[in-house]
Amino acid sequence: MNRLIKAMIICALLTHSGWTKVKVVASTPDLASIAGIIGGSEVEVISIAKGAVNPHYVEVLPSYMIKVARANLYLKVGMGLDQWADPIIDGSRNSKLTIVDCSQGVNRLQVPTGKVDASLGDVHPQGNPHYWLDPANGLVIAANIVEGLCKVDPANCQAYRDSYERFISDLKIRFGIWEKRAATLRGSQIVTFHDSWPYFAQAFGLEVVGFIEPKPGIEPTPSHTRELIELMKGRGVKIIGMEPYFSNRVPNSIAAAAGAKVIVLPPSVGGAPEIKDYFELFDTLIAKLTTAKE
């Protein structure tokens, strides 16, 4: 780390005590959105990753270290998704930073039972880390965030707990609405580009029967593509969902051969212009899927 970066971080730390709002940095915009809802006017929240960018791969930049140097609280996705956050946190030299792993308490899916190595692709030893895509896990995330906020700002702890109770009520009401809107999706089979969707599929009754990637993080091969086309034809699968940060070349080719359609499914807040918060993420995903099924 060069002298200029060190100086900037030191200046950020020296001015830290002069701020009135709790500074929160989150790895992803989904965690940031929930933190903003819970913290309200008492917090200032920023996200390192952007919603339309693959959250597995984030370049470690000095500017991120400076942001974390100014923070009271850091929110991690955990489960191996945001390992890039560790060098950012270490580089911030912020000894007063409280770090919260928002995956604590999540009912984890796809936890490997055998040896995990590179031959399996980008498989996470602690399970699939896309847990925020089940609204029930939004409650777990929020509970973890509340504890973190209470630790760094005990004076406003009751206000954070009150916000959490309102968040629970709002999310339960919205989940009931989402379930009704998604009723036609139950039992539907889809193919997705990456294995981002087991939690969402479990929550709303979808069945993901295949992936464009032969293994997580591995580019599709011609043989895998042919097998996937035959699978889709045999099962009558008509929808391919893909994240906005992947190329649509192979999905479009498969869809044309299998008589299906490709839809872009943003897995995070900010992944599309209309997705400004955690609630709108599910509004958009369900709307896209139900429209595609019509």
Image (cartoon, rainbow, N blue to C red):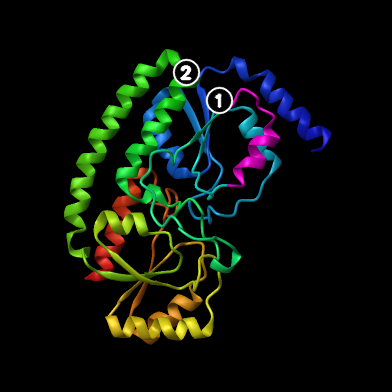
Residue 46 in the image, given as x and y percentages of width and height: 52, 36
- Among the 4 quarters of the image, the one containing residue 261: bottom left
**The one of 82 and 252 positioned closer to us in this rendering:** 82
Split into 4 quadrants, where in the image is the N terminus? top right
Can residue 259 be seen?
A: no
Whether 14 is among the magenta residues is no
- Among the 4 quarters of the image, the one containing residue 289: bottom left
Residue that extends furthest to the top in the rendered view of this protein: 155
Q: Which region shows up in magenta?
A: 83-97
Split into 4 quadrants, where in the image is the C terminus? bottom left
Residue type at the position of mark 2:
Asp
Q: Residue at x 50, y 20 (%)?
A: 152
Mark 2 and mark 1 residues within 8 Å of each other at the beta carbon: yes
Report whether 12 appears left or right of 138. Answer: right
Above or below, 29 against 200 in this view is above
Residue identified by numbered label 1: 72
Report whether 32 appears left or right of 199. Answer: right
Residue 32 in the image, given as x and y percentages of width and height: 46, 38
Report whether 14 appears left or right of 235. Answer: right
Above or below, 170 against 116 in this view is above
Callout 2: SS: loop
Residue identified by numbered label 2: 153
Density class for disc 2 (Cα within 10 Å; few <14, some 14-19, many ≥20) is some
